Image (cartoon, rainbow, N blue to C red):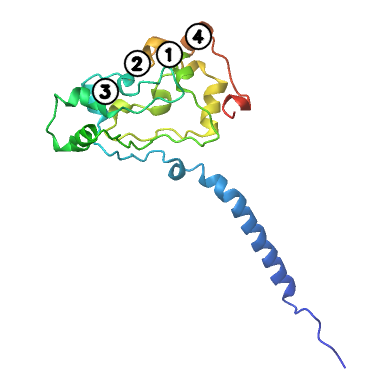
Amino acid sequence: MTTSGVFQPSSNSRFALGCGGIFLLVLVAILGPMIFVRTPFYSREGYPVHQPVQFDHRHHVADDGIDCRYCHTTVEKSSTAGFPSVQTCMNCHSQVWNESPSLEVVREAYFRDLPIHWQRVHRLPDFVYFDHSIHVAKGVGCVECHGRVDEMALVWQTTSMTMAFCLECHRDPAPRLRPREAVFDMTWQPPGDRRALGNELMKSYDVHTRTSCTTCHR
């Protein structure tokens, strides 16, 4: 008299497939989010952001020559660059295009004393500290992070804004520095060897490599 075994002949194969499936699930659960947060879809890199008002930077910056600081008033003295107030818009548009349907949102907000809810384009995680004022003071141009805004109808994020992106500059800032008077100049080009100029500016502006965790995580 014979008895059948507890396990079927195919049990080994099923067990191996099951272990392999569990391993793959764990791998996807760990690596999936790590890969996803590095994709342009997550960072919104290259995706134009629509605003409540049709604001064309090409016209305001390139055509009219309006300085970044006219709208982003706190960029030199605060961690945030600031958003333009309704009054800032109306300084010009109470006289120019003051009946344009495109600016109805601005006029309504002004007369009702309401803010315009601008949509943020560049988003950093809450655990990251970034100070605009120190970067401006050290000679980092707007275009290094924001790209050629003067060529954008709708602004989009041109860089990944990841930790790797920031560390690349913090480890070797010289090629990304410019004279302070050119920080807001979208079309500035270095007069010669940019690294040599950057090395000079590092000494002049007391710029050092900064890679400690507490630089950005406080």
Which quadrant would the C terminus be assigned to in this image? top right
> Quadrant location of residue 9?
bottom right
Question: Callout 4, which amino acid?
Answer: Tyr
Which of disc 2 and disc 1 is earlier in sequence? 1
* Label 2 residue SS: loop
> Quadrant location of residue 19?
bottom right
Q: Which mark is residue 205?
A: 4
In front of the other: label 4 or label 1?
A: 4
Which of disc 1 and disc 4 is earlier in sequence? 1
Question: Callout 2, which amino acid?
Answer: Trp
Cα gap from disc 1 to disc 3, whole angstroms: 20 Å
- Whether residue 215 is situated above or below residue 105 in the rendered picture: above
**Of residues 53 and 26, the one drawn nearer to the viewer in this rendering:** 53
In front of the other: label 2 or label 4?
A: 4
Q: Which residue is mark 3?
A: 61
Q: Residue furthest bottom?
A: 1
